[in-house]
Amino acid sequence: MPSLSVVIPSYNHRAFLPAAFESLEAQTYRDFEVVVVDDGSTDNSPDLIREFAATTPLQTKIHLQSNAGAHAAITKGIDIAEGRNIAILNSDDVFHPDRLRRLMAVVPASGPFIAFSEFAFIDAHGERITADIHNRWWYRHLLERHAYSPGIGFTLVQGNLSISTSNFLFSRELYDLLGGFRQYRTAHDLDFLLRAIFHVEPIFVREVLLNYRLHGTNTITANRELERREVSELFLDYLNQATTEKPANPRAPASEVLAVYSDQVLRQQNLWFELDRNAPAFTRLRQAADLARAQNPDTAAMEGEVNRLRHEVGRLMGELAHRALPALPERLPLRAYKRVRTWPVVKPIRMAARVLGLRVPRRWL
């Protein structure tokens, strides 16, 4: 029995499958099997999968099914897999040659766990993406927030630090404990992580061991509105759990600890603003915050210091934006400015407008 099973959910990625397969054959860690589940592809992916299974030296199993979504393909693959640990590689992504060895070196020999690493963005041709300001800035900013978060869970409730199920390596024990992946089409990865942090603190390896591919047919790229609805729903589920149960993982954001940080979390995660603030979970969160302040004066002092620092950062950014504002029309014509949606451009303009007391039309931002 292999110690690890790599599950590949595949759907219409004929152009990307060879790179995914090659990255597995190049692994320095060898005690693993490969389970490929084709989720009803309409290109000739199944033929390529059969060819790979027939020629690769890796122990390989394949399963073809009607289209049911990534979560269903992953679930089927895990059902077929024999390894006591599971890694996932989506058919359009690529593993670093040393990925499995590095992750398996840091995970426990038994018990529930989940691990992931840093990643890099690549394009449809497999080249590193350097010009995509939005994605690169978003990820870098999330890593910076993580540096002063009390735990990985506090970063995850602000953004998906792992980016994808391709970045997951977890024990079958954790999978069984959580009851597997739930039926979210775009957000099953974040949902799995948020449920996992209630039980274990994720292991985050600070090395780029995954190449995450951006292309026009990414499931999330093609379903942005569905993604927002699903993420809003799963965050409300998490908040309900966080305000009613005590987590097994003491570093998980829950109860009065989440309440202390809730202002920061809610401000950073824009999707939270779509939730009903009168929901029982929010009432419990406010009550937990009030109780924490009443029972521990240090809590209120700490919360006040966090807010003071946040306002100070906002003031400094506003000053910088104010100084840069006179030069903006020369560097960025109004007609171009209206089309810009990248946060590094938008944020200084918002800050400058706030400092100057101006109202910038929302359609421009």
Image (cartoon, helix red, strand yellow):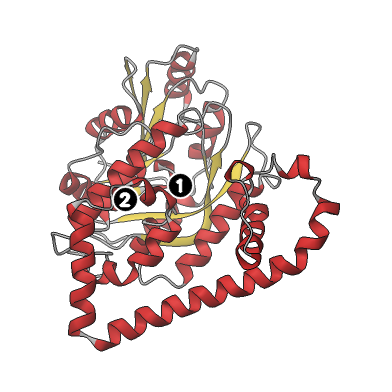
From the image, tell me which residue sits under label 2: 193
Q: Which residue is at a point 17% across and 42% down the rendered structure image? A: 179
- Left or right of 144, for residue 357: right
- Left or right of 274, for residue 340: right
Q: Is 224 drawn above or below residue 341 in the view shown?
A: above
From the image, tell me which residue sits under label 1: 163
Q: Nearer the viewer, residue 296 or 141?
A: 296
Q: Is 41 drawn above or below residue 327 in the view shown?
A: above
**C-alpha gap between disc 1 and disc 2:** 11 Å
Instruction: Give the SS element for disc 1.
Output: loop
User: How far across and down, in percent of the image, does residue 133 sit?
Assistant: 66, 49
Query: Which quadrant holds residue 267?
Result: bottom left
User: How far across and down, in percent of the image, does residue 144 sit?
Assistant: 53, 66
User: How far across and down, in percent of the image, does residue 68 sit?
Assistant: 31, 21
Q: Earlier in the sequence, mark 1 or mark 2?
A: 1
- Left or right of 292, for residue 332: right
Quadrant containing the N terminus in the rendered view: top left
Farthest residue toward the right?
Answer: 330
Q: Which residue is at a point 80% across and 49% down the rendered structure image? A: 332
Q: Which residue is at a point 64% across and 43% down the rendered structure image? A: 364
User: How far across and down, in percent of the image, does residue 20 sit?
Assistant: 51, 34
The answer to whether one can see residue 4 in this image is no
Q: Which residue is at a point 20% across and 55% down the rendered structure image? A: 281
The total of numbered circles placed on residues is 2
Farthest residue toward the left?
Answer: 245
Instruction: Give the SS element for disc 2.
Output: helix
Q: Amino acid at mark 2?
A: Leu
Q: Is 266 drawn above or below residue 40 in the view shown?
A: below
Q: Residues within 10 Å of mark 1 (few under 14, many from 20)?
A: some
